[in-house]
């Protein structure tokens, strides 16, 4: 990056001293973690469980973090059951998915069910609905 590019993005920020050693000095701000749920529900959910356990720890520390928001696309819910499954298998897959969401995700975050064409639209949807929170 050229120096001119760096200087251009070096606009003053409220609560941050100017200069090369910028440090955020405001302590009244809180972080709102947002998780975009995977488009395809994974067969092995261990990584998701670890992610939410880590978020639990962060949120319990010192009040700097809000309860996380999980963005769950309607297409993910619909893709749990495939056309190759029998009706019984599809029903069981949907049931296991909903049980996982109820037990692991909704107990640890605020779930926002959305209908979006892609991940970008999911981010925009959350930004617009939580702007100013």
Image (spheres, rainbow, N blue to C red):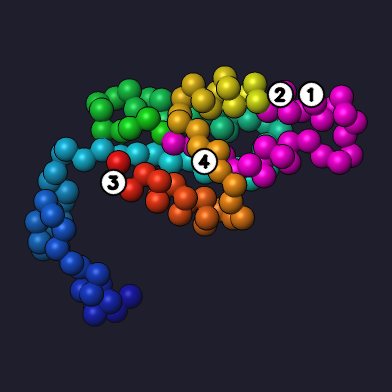
Secondary structure under tag 1 reads helix
Query: In the image, is residue 62 above or below residue 120?
Result: above
Which residue is tagged 4? 71
The residue depicted at 34 percent of the width and 27 percent of the height is 59
**Residue stretch in magenta:** 69-97
Q: CA distance from mark 2 to mark 4?
A: 19 Å
Secondary structure under tag 3 reads loop
Q: Nearer the viewer, mark 3 or mark 2?
A: 3
Which residue is tagged 3? 132
Mark sitting on residue 30? none
Q: Nearer the viewer, residue 122 or 23?
A: 122
Which residue is tagged 2? 96
Q: CA distance from mark 3 to mark 4?
A: 18 Å
Q: CA distance from mark 4 to mark 1?
A: 23 Å
Residue 14 in view here: yes
Mark 2 or mark 4: name the one nearer the start of the chain. 4
């Amino acid at each position: 990056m050229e120096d001119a590019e760096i200087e251009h993005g070096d606009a003053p920020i409220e609560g941050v001293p100017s200069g090369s050693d910028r440090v955020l000095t405001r302590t009244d701000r809180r972080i709102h973690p947002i998780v975009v749920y995977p488009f395809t529900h994974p067969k092995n959910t261990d990584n998701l469980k670890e992610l939410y356990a880590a978020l639990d720890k962060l949120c319990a520390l010192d009040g700097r973090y809000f309860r996380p928001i999980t963005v769950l696309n309607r297409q993910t819910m619909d893709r749990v059951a495939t056309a190759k499954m029998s009706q019984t298998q599809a029903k069981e897959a949907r049931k296991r998915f909903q049980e996982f969401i109820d037990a692991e995700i909704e107990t640890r975050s605020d779930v926002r069910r959305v209908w979006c064409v892609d991940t970008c639209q999911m981010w925009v949807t959350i930004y617009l609905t939580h702007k100013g929170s």
